[in-house]
Structure formats: C-alpha cells, structure tokens
Image (cartoon, grey):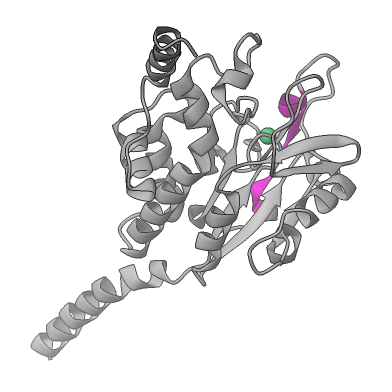
Amino acid sequence: MKWTLLIFVLLFSACAELTRYPANTDEIRHVVFDIDWTIVSEIKEGHKVPSKRVIEVQGHKYFIAEGLEEFIQSILDKKDVKISFFSGGTLVRNHELLSKIKLKDQRSLKDIAYKVLNFEDLVTVDTTEGVPFAERNKKDLTKVSKDLDQLIMFDDTYNFALETKVPQNNNVFFIGSALEHFDSFKDAQGLTGKYIPVSYEQWLLNNKKLYILNMAFNEAYMESKSGNITFSEAMKRKEDALNLKSHEWNEVSEHYYKTYFKTAPLKNAQDSFKCAEGMKLLIGW
Ligand SMILES: [Mg+2]
C-alpha cells in the first residue's frame, strides 16, 4: 500500500510538471497600440507635407507610420493574438482616424480592432492644473484584458499606464519619444525643435521603427510560445535590448533591420551627400 501511494505521488508530480508549460502557450495574447506618435505623426503647420501616406482627420493632417500595415498583418496572421488601440484622443476622432487606415484586403484598423479605447476610457488620477495630460490621465490596460502577462502596449509616452490598481508599466513597451516625420532627412535640415531629427541615422531609425518592432514582436511571440517566459516579459526584454528611447541604432536594431530589409541600415549618408555635391562641383554641373 505504501509503495502504491509512493508511485501514485511520483506519477502525479511528473504529470503536473508535463502539463504546466503547455497551459501557458495557448493563451490569447494582446497587442495594444497607442495612436498619436506611435502609428501616426501629425504634420506640423508650415512643415513639408509628405508625398504619400497622409490622412486628414478633423482638420489635422497625419502621416501613417511606415511599416504599420505590414506589422498589423503579421500580428493578424497569428490566430492567438488580438489587436487593440488605446489613445488619449476622443472616441469620434479615433474611430475616424482608424477607419482611414486600410490594410491590403481593404479592412480598416477599426474593422480589425478587438477594442478601441479612447479619452473617455482614461482614468483621472490627478486634477491639478498645469500637470501634464499623461500624468493626470492614465490608461488602464485591464480594460483590454485582465491577463496582463499576455499583454503589451506600444506607446511613445513613458508612464501613461495606470499604476494604482495593479502595476502596469511592465506592460508598456516605450518606443521612445517620436520625432516628426519627414520624407527625406534634407526636409528636416534647418528646422529646430525637440522632435526634429538631428542626424540622418536618427531620421532613419525614426522612420523604420515599426519594421524593427515587427521583428521584435515576432521573436517575443515565439519565445512566449515556448512556455518559459510570458509574452509581456519577452517584449519588455526586447524594449531593453533595443533601447529606442536613445534614438540611436545598436546591434539589435541593426540586426532586425538587416533581417527585414536584407540590407544594412545606411550610414554616413551625409558623407555620400557631400561627396555627390563635391562631384557636381568638380565636373561643373
Ligand atoms: Mg502617443
């Protein structure tokens, strides 16, 4: 009897061990996108309007970030991942904006969204006048899903998630403060401001950010499928490794770029530009 009991206990623990990991991997994962300066950038008054990918919503012009449709499609291809949007813009504005961004199959981002959360869904934590908007109002990610282990939000605003109910900053992938969009780095030259790219490399990284995030997402997704790490943890490791807030390329961002585009990110474009100018002078153009 003693031996039977021992064998039963051993068998039970072995089975429990075997069944623990797969239970994690089939859960629904959630990707949440902020809208302003994450998937679109507003075109500032007087700045050169990009030649394409521009939509107009409530009198404002927005550039649709490069690589957005490819990123969304790559998430949609995974049947256990849902896409939501959470923005400080109003419901009317957000719905109109998301309806104007179309995928190849003509569905809009509003059509494919699991949830669209708006200004009306923010939680007010401070009403002091003069305090910045994102410090007074917070995004409660549990409104998208209660299972925060399997949720990540891409946001250009640091610290926009609600921390008072349950800690949620571990569910925010800070993509760095976004710079204004310019079709070419030359269009930004001569302009000054906090959000103007100051080098060709910075301009390129800002423009290609979503392709890089697409690669990071795909890797983190696969890692989370192994069952050894949650989806949010895997994404947060990518956030650290990419360090996009620095606005500088590193080995990881270069590797993702190279894998996606099959070519290394261009460097020293300024030098090649100067060289071309020099050649023109030399041959008298
Ligand atoms: Mg934003």
Is residue 238 left or right of 61 when viewed as pictured?
A: left
Q: Is residue 4 left or right of residue 272?
A: left
Residue at image x 43%, y 54%?
A: 231
- Residue 247 visible, this orientation: no
Q: Quadrant of the N terminus?
A: bottom left
Residue 264 in the magenta stretch? The answer is: no
Nearest to the observer: residue 48 or residue 236:
48
| Residue 17, quarter of the rendered image | bottom left
On the image, the x and y values in percent for residue 193 come to: 66, 11
Residue 113 vs 45, above or below: the answer is below
Which secondary structure class fits the magenta region best? helix
Where residue 255 appears, x then y in whole percent?
31, 40
Q: Out of 180 and 35, give the one closest to the viewer.
A: 180
Residue shown at 65% from the left, 52% from the top? 142
Q: Is residue 59 left or right of residue 73?
A: right
Looking at this view, is 63 or 75 the one in front?
Answer: 63
Examine the image and state in which quarter residue 66 appears: top right
| Residue 58 falls in image quadrant | top right
Could you tell me which residue is drawn at 59 percent across and 63 percent down?
82
The image shows residue 46, relative to residue 234, as above or below, that is above
**Location of ligand 1 given as a quarter of the image:** top right
- Specify the segment rendered in magenta: 133-142
User: In this view, which residue lies farthest toward the left?
Assistant: 3
Figure disc tally:
0
> Is residue 53 among what the camera can see?
yes
Q: From the viewer's perspective, is 187 left or right of 27?
A: right
Q: Position of residue 72 (x, y in %)?
A: 57, 57
Residue 134 within the segment the image draws in magenta: yes
Using the image, determine if residue 233 lies above or below residue 248.
below
